[in-house]
């Protein structure tokens, strides 16, 4: 029986993880949950799964949850309710836990994820920021503990699977597939007038707002380049992005002899979650892909001039440390400003580039250092954002 902690249990990866656990009650058991701000769903999950510990973001919500659980007949000995950053760390490092699913969006999941690795837990990573801003620290600690970091991001999960086809020194390059986002065929001349509504209209995946905008700028793919470099310990020039609008192949690995292995499956996050939870085993599932329905697969190189965020991410991947922190922080600030219609679509890469340029290169030695620089970079990015902010009316749709 594998005992599982979920960081981000009320989010979409968290809920998918619980649905996998539900399908295999003889294999997995929920030990602890970190639920963030959704107190209502946290209550339902606590009643359904009776975890040892539940953590919520703030103290008042935690107290309210505790009294509701009491009324429902679940005392402190059954379910302990904690809160805040320390609460999340407690969920991640609980002695009963074998496996931690790290699915809190943003850098707020970083400390708990790092502590889970440090406590010798096997970690399934769905959070991007952890690897982007602190990939060097996380992977070094995992190596020290002799525990794998198992990717739940669909592309890296695919690469992880393909890498089982050979040794690391037999790998020529990693190919990350990209859907291309909603502006794959939009001419560059129209980019200045892209609206929030258009950018939020992703062709393949239904996701949160930031990751949807990041998919439209290809910054998401840029983050994935950095994740791949850190997870698989390869330099950025051996990670290539290829646009594949059908998103049928989740990613590929090319070996030195010229063989290329690809991973195909349904676009359902339960599969990478199941893969990570059962690694190194594979177990039967109902997540079938109908290969006979497959008609064609298209591929094209990404347009680096149209999507400067991708190039900036390659730069950050090569420099590492401080530059990756600046990249992530500036992008989050710029995307928020774009969503509020303060800046245009093309200002996002400008703000990222300026923030990266203003952040001195360097490598951080602790998670605390990473978080401090993250705060600094956000302040810088807000300054840059003000300079680009549009005066007057919000951006109009292309007519
Ligand atoms: Mg992905």
Image (cartoon, rainbow, N blue to C red):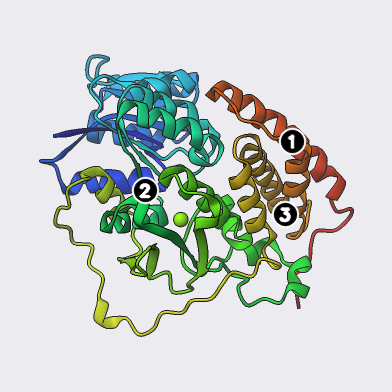
Residue nearer the viewer, 279 or 378: 279
Q: Are marks 3 and 1 in contact (CB under 8 Å)?
A: no
Tag 2–tag 1 contact (CB < 8 Å): no
Q: Which numbered disc flags the more N-terminal residue, 2 or 1?
A: 2
Tell me the tag on residue 349: 3
Instruction: Pick whichever, 383 or 360, lies toward us.
Output: 360
- Please give the name of the residue rendered at 48% of the width and 19% of the height, measured from the top-left corner: 59
Point out the image quarter for the N terminus: top left
Q: Measured from the top left, where is residue 31 in percent x and y?
A: 25, 28
- 10 Å neighbourhood of mark 1: few (<14), some, or many (≥20)? some
Regarding residue 330, the answer to whether it shows in the image is yes
Mark linked to residue 368: none
The image quarter containing residue 256 is: bottom left
Q: Residues within 10 Å of mark 2 (few under 14, many from 20)?
A: many
Tell me which label, 3 or 2, sits earlier in the chain: 2
The answer to whether any part of residue 68 appears in the image is no
At numbered mark 1, what does the secondary structure look like: helix, strand or loop? loop
Q: Nearer the viewer, mark 2 or mark 1?
A: 1
Question: Circle 3: is it few (<14), some (14-19), or many (20+) Cα within 10 Å?
Answer: many
Q: Nearer the viewer, mark 3 or mark 1?
A: 1
- Out of 193 and 366, give the one closest to the viewer: 366
Vertical placement of residue 18 versus 283, above or below: above
Pointer 1 residue: 359
**Pointer 2 residue:** 152
């Amino acid at each position: 029986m594998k005992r599982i902690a979920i960081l981000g249990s009320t989010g979409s990866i968290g809920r998918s993880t619980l649905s996998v656990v539900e399908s295999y009650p003889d294999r997995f058991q929920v030990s602890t949950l970190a639920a963030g701000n959704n107190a209502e769903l946290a209550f339902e999950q606590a009643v359904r799964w009776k975890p040892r510990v539940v953590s919520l973001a703030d103290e008042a919500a935690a107290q309210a949850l505790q009294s509701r659980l009491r009324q429902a007949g679940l005392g402190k000995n059954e379910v302990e309710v904690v809160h805040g950053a320390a609460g999340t760390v407690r969920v991640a490092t609980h002695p009963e836990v074998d496996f931690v699913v790290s699915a809190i969006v943003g850098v707020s999941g970083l400390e708990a994820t790092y502590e889970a690795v440090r406590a010798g837990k096997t970690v399934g990573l769905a959070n991007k920021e952890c690897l982007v801003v602190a990939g060097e620290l996380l992977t070094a600690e995992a190596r020290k503990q002799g525990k794998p970091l198992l990717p739940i991001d669909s592309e890296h999960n695919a690469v992880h699977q393909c890498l089982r086809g050979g040794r690391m020194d037999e790998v020529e390059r990693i190919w990350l597939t990209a859907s291309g986002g909603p502006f794959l065929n939009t001419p560059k001349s129209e980019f200045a007038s892209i609206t929030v509504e258009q950018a939020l209209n992703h062709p393949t995946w239904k996701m949160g707002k930031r990751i949807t905008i990041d998919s439209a700028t290809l910054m998401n793919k840029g983050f994935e380049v950095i994740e791949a470099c850190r997870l698989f310990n390869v330099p950025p020039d051996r990670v290539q992005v290829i646009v594949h609008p059908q998103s049928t192949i989740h990613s590929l690995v090319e070996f030195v002899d010229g063989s290329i292995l690809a991973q195909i499956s349904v676009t359902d996050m339960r599969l990478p979650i199941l893969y990570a939870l059962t690694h190194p085993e594979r177990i039967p599932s109902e997540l079938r892909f109908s290969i006979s329905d497959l008609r064609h697969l298209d591929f094209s190189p990404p347009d680096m001039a149209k999507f400067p965020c991708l190039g900036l991410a390659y730069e950050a991947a090569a420099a590492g440390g401080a530059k990756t922190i600046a990249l992530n922080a500036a992008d989050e600030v710029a995307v928020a400003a774009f969503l509020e219609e303060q800046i245009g679509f093309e200002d996002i890469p400008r703000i990222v580039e300026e923030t990266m340029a203003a952040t001195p290169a360097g490598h951080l030695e602790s998670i605390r250092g990473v978080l401090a620089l993250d705060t600094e970079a956000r302040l810088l990015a807000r300054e840059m954002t003000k300079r680009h902010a549009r005066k007057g009316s919000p951006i109009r749709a292309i007519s």
